[in-house]
Image (spheres, grey):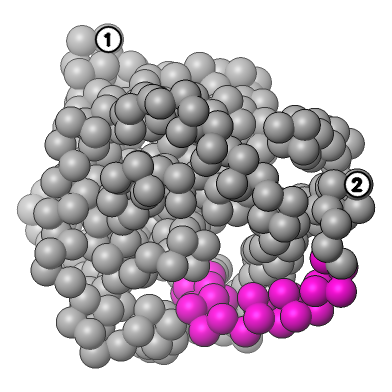
Amino acid sequence: MLAVILSFLILLSFLILSVPVASSIAGVAIIIGTFFSDYPIFSSIGELTWSTSTEYILLSIPFFVLLGELLLHSGMARKIYFAINVWLSWLPGGLMHSNVAASTFFSSISGSSVATAATITTVAMPQGKKYGYEEGLFAGSIAAGGTLGILIPPSLNLIIYGFLTNTSIPALFMAGLLPGIVLALLFMFYIFIHDKYRNSAKKEVEKYTWKQKFSELKNFVPTLSLFALVMGTIYTGLATPTESAAIGVLGALAIIYFSKLLTKEVLIKSIEGTMKTTGMIMLIILAANFLNYVLISIGLIDEIEYFLEDLNISKYMLLFVITIIFIVLGLFIETLSLMVITIPIVAPIAISMGFDGVWLGIYLIILIEMALITPPVGLNLYVVQSIRKSGSVVEVMKGCIPFVLIMCLMAFLLVLFPQIALYLVQFV
């Protein structure tokens, strides 16, 4: 257990010193391997790096990132937001409903929470200020809505979970769909109740005619068709997740082209963003894979399993311990790093205790979602605040508190009703 404590302290120290995440993880692996392992682990770095980086399923990551980047830089995301707002503006808290609904829809295409939060913030915040919304809650609805990007398919995080645990990606995508929709509806229900009884908007939002509503469908239907194309090819077995991601990129290019939004600048920015994001993700995965190899080589995984067996705790007590660990670590560690460090250790133990691997993936992703909007390292908080450019990030943090509690409720509902995640899996 000394290795566990030392690993965490070293990693936390590196992150506090702003050492890049991949370098921090690799540094921990090198230090632990040097002092605790009797095996020549460093001679395996080349083979480990090569075998990991050539995994076919990981090829889907740059394609899904490029898909989101194209929609972001072309301005299609802005059109989606206003189209949804036209339909939802009549509800109490109308613009905040649009924040959540647009985040849900855009995340289902981009698969990235940070990209979703950045995009919706850019479009929505000026509208929120114009109509006098309570800025903290308004910004919180964007940050929380952005977290749905790692739950609703196609999700980069679900792909990484499937890679780390050898779980079916199509099954994970199908399992994440219903919980993602339910969580979005719970967000919107809270907004409805809050606005109806607390009147968070000072001004009446503009009303739209039915003609205007149907007119806006031209901005909504193409991207909805793109989602159906990407996910449909996966669920019907016509394409693998990697192939469907490539099909999605072609579909996005076609939509942008016929919308007369495809320019050289859009392509350059999209490709640059894809290269940066993919490079970051792959470096973290490679470093984490090396760290996991080191931990296995020193027998840490076996020690943890033996320790849990000696405790003789129930599977649900184990789940409670895992939940607390993820919530606490999520306060200090970025979400992708949290996944690749913990899941290779936690998932095998939980699955051996009787939890379904697909269900466990969705449950852990919801816990990881919380890390995106909980201080001090919640990425979405700072993304929203940096684009908002007014007030304090503390206002955004306070605005996110109700949504964090709703995520806790969603995790509890998954434990009580596992079929929320597993019902659609039977159709894969």
The answer to whether 38 appears left or right of 96 in the picture is right
Q: Is residue 58 magenta?
A: yes
In the rendered image, the quadrant that contains the N terminus is top right
Q: Secondary structure at mark 2?
A: helix
The answer to whether 216 appears left or right of 259 in the picture is left
In the rendered image, the quadrant that contains the C terminus is bottom left
Q: Position of residue 370 (x, y in %)?
A: 47, 33
Q: Secondary structure at mark 1?
A: helix
Assign the magenta stretch its main secondary structure. helix
Q: Quadrant of residue 166?
A: bottom left
Q: Position of residue 84 (x, y in %)?
A: 26, 52
Q: Amino acid at mark 2?
A: Phe
Is residue 50 positioned above or below 45 on the image?
below
Magenta residues span: 41-68
Q: Position of residue 192 (x, y in %)?
A: 20, 25
- Seen from the viewer's position, the closer of residues 402 and 262 is 402
Q: Residues within 10 Å of mark 1 (few under 14, many from 20)?
A: few
Q: Which mark is residue 306?
A: none
Could one spot residue 187 in this view of the protein?
no
Could one spot residue 392 in this view of the protein?
yes
Q: Which residue is mark 1?
A: 198
The residue drawn where x is 45% and y is 45% is 349
Q: Which mark is residue 35?
A: 2
The answer to whether 406 appears left or right of 48 in the picture is left
Q: Residue furthest left?
A: 210
> N-terminal of the two: label 1 or label 2?
2
